[in-house]
Image: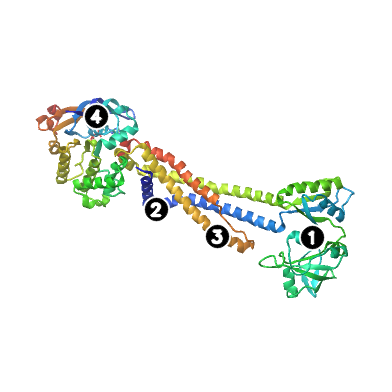
Amino acid sequence: METLIEFRQVCKYYRMGEETVVAADHIDMTIQRGEFVAIVGQSGSGKSTCMNIIGCLDVPSEGVYLLDGQNVGQLSAKKLAAIRNKMLGFIFQQYNLLPKQSILENVEVPLMYAGVPRGERRRRAMEALEQVGLADKYRHRPSQLSGGQQQRASIARALAGRPAIILADEPTGALDSHTGREVLSMLQDVHRQGNTVVLITHDNSIACQAQRIIRLEDGRVVYDGDPHAPQAVVRHRPGGEEAAQ
Amino acid sequence: MSILETFGLALQNIWASKVRTLLTMLGIIIGVTAVIVIVGLGNGMQNYMRDSFASLGTNQLTVMISGRGSSRSISVDEMYQLVEDNASLLDGLSPTVSVMGQIKVDTETLSSSVTGVGEDYLDMKGLTLAQGRGIQYADVSERRTVCVVGAYVAREYFQNNAVGQTLRVNGRKVSIVGVLEQQEDDMDEGGSDDCLYLPYSTASRFFSGGQVSSYMVTVADEDRINDAQTVLEDALYAVFGDSDSYTVSNMAAALETMNSMIGMVITILALIAGISLLVGGIGIMNIMLVSVSERTREIGIRKALGAREGVILRQFVIEAATTSGLGGLFGIALGYLLSRVATVVITNLTETAITVSPSLAAVAMASGISIAIGVLFGFLPARKAARLNPIDALRYD
Ligand SMILES: Nc1ncnc2c1ncn2[C@@H]1O[C@H](COP(=O)(O)OP(=O)(O)OP(=O)(O)O)[C@@H](O)[C@H]1O
Ligand SMILES: [Mg+2]
């Protein structure tokens, strides 16, 4: 298998006045092309920090991040923008759709930045909307859709540019369990079509659907492997940390 | 993403906050309107000046002999000789004698201007006769008490039947031998048509001090009027030996001086109006800064989806330029409208026919400047937006 994402001793520090918060603490990990990985961990454990680094929205304070063999830390802002545009598709917990634009226009945005001509852009955006079952709502504004529909629209937007990697940061966090499962099954479809999917979640039942779980605690990787192993599941009681190890 | 699409997006954003955009544009609108109207007013005044000077004649020099500082003097014949000697530059000469006095037709008193002139005067002035004849050499040499009257006098006091009639100038009977063609569209008391011309010899003998002290000289070539003036001045200096004894004035030069003065005043006024453009630019910068912080999240999303810094920069700069450009457009429209209104108001209030005519150059400059202001003042906020760290922008709320 081909390595797509590789962290080598990646650290991320945030300076808060006098204190320094360590959000990522010498993380080593690799994700292969075509994998479906769930990153789990308690709140504040550094999941979003890792995701933002993977997504080239942020850069490590220390260490090296290789994306498809390229050292991201050495790339220009312009190159990074191109990578975000062509290789990565984001799905956010808060959907992050542009409120003043229609669903179709929202889905077109990444294609527009990729320089896809208008006609083809429209066609591909409609295709992506069909894939998530929103083709009939293409003229609606995000505010006219339910949370689940908005999240589907944002999935369509992530898929429209046909990126190699789909990054989803708690995509089901704001949804009820039924809609959450729907979104998850969409991600599974995307994975089956050959995409690499990295999913952040709190929900064990959702994490278990992934091929692999990476568990973070205080910015460190404490488990990396089979989602069905007993250690993969976090126990919410004192001493749970040791139990997980 | 093409410029056209960016432009469309800018229009979309502007349309989404119409009232705010309109208020932002106000400074630009007022500035552009003011510049256009002021420059238009300047053009109008210059045109008005040119027209009124043209009726005075821009091919004319006026000579005034004061005799001050010299015991010498110059006779009318010597003046004629002087003009003849410089025929390559100087064309015609006529003494002009202003007569102060009372003109009466029966018991009615007229307020017409009365001038004593030579036999060439009407030709030199381009005045033509409607009836009768003009002032002739014999009238001058024999000091006849004859006169030519303007169309207004003929109409008002003689029912257009003036030739052969008489009037009284300072009690002396003068007979009318000719009537001039009407000059102005609306003849009025005190206008160019309310006039009376006598032979200068008659005028100086009977109605003023006896001396002829002012002359009108026409030049052969209007373009060489300054040379003509110099020649005339040199010749007069040779006679008097003192430059205080005479003055030669040049209508074209006076017009030029007037025009450059008007031009200067207008430029200063336009610059002051231009300050409003600067204020408008600052207003645009202000609103763009607000817009950038309001849309930080949008910028974050766009960056996450692959927008390059250049694209974001372009988006905001074009938005600012579109705002100010639209303001400029409104300003131009308003400027033209106000120019029309100002023309009517000025004509009615001052009874001078000044047409406020905005120049294309002013319009081009105003629109260029307003767009440039948008780009200039939009650049700083746009760069701020473009340089936002994507993750910070996404987290912002
Ligand atoms: N911009 C920031 N400035 C300062 N500290 C930050 C910043 N972003 C994250 N942190 C800190 O880094 C740590 C990891 O944050 P992160 O957002 O990665 O956690 P998370 O695992 O995604 O949590 P959650 O499940 O609540 O989303 C936290 O302690 C957080 O306070
Ligand atoms: Mg998080």
Disc number placed over residue B380 in the picture, else none? none
Q: Nearer the viewer, residue A124 or A75?
A: A124
- Amino acid type at circle 3 is Arg
A235 is higher (above) or lower (below) than B54? above
Q: Chain of mark 4?
A: A
Cβ of disc 2 within 8 Å of ligand 1? no
Q: Disc 1 marks which residue?
A: B120
Q: Disc 2 marks which residue?
A: B18
Q: Are marks 3 and 4 on the same chain?
A: no
Figure quadrant, ligand 2: top left
Q: Disc 4 marks which residue?
A: A68
Q: Is residue B340 visible?
A: yes
Label located before the other in sequence (2 or 3): 2
Q: CA distance from mark 1 to mark 2?
A: 69 Å
Q: Residue at x 15, y 32 (%)?
A: A213
Q: CA distance from mark 2 to mark 4?
A: 46 Å
A47 is higher (above) or lower (below) than B298? above
- Amino acid type at circle 1 is Asp
Query: Where does the image place residue B171, in percent across and percent down from the top left?
Result: 85, 70
Q: Residue at x 25, y 51 (%)?
A: A138
Q: Is residue B397 visible?
A: no
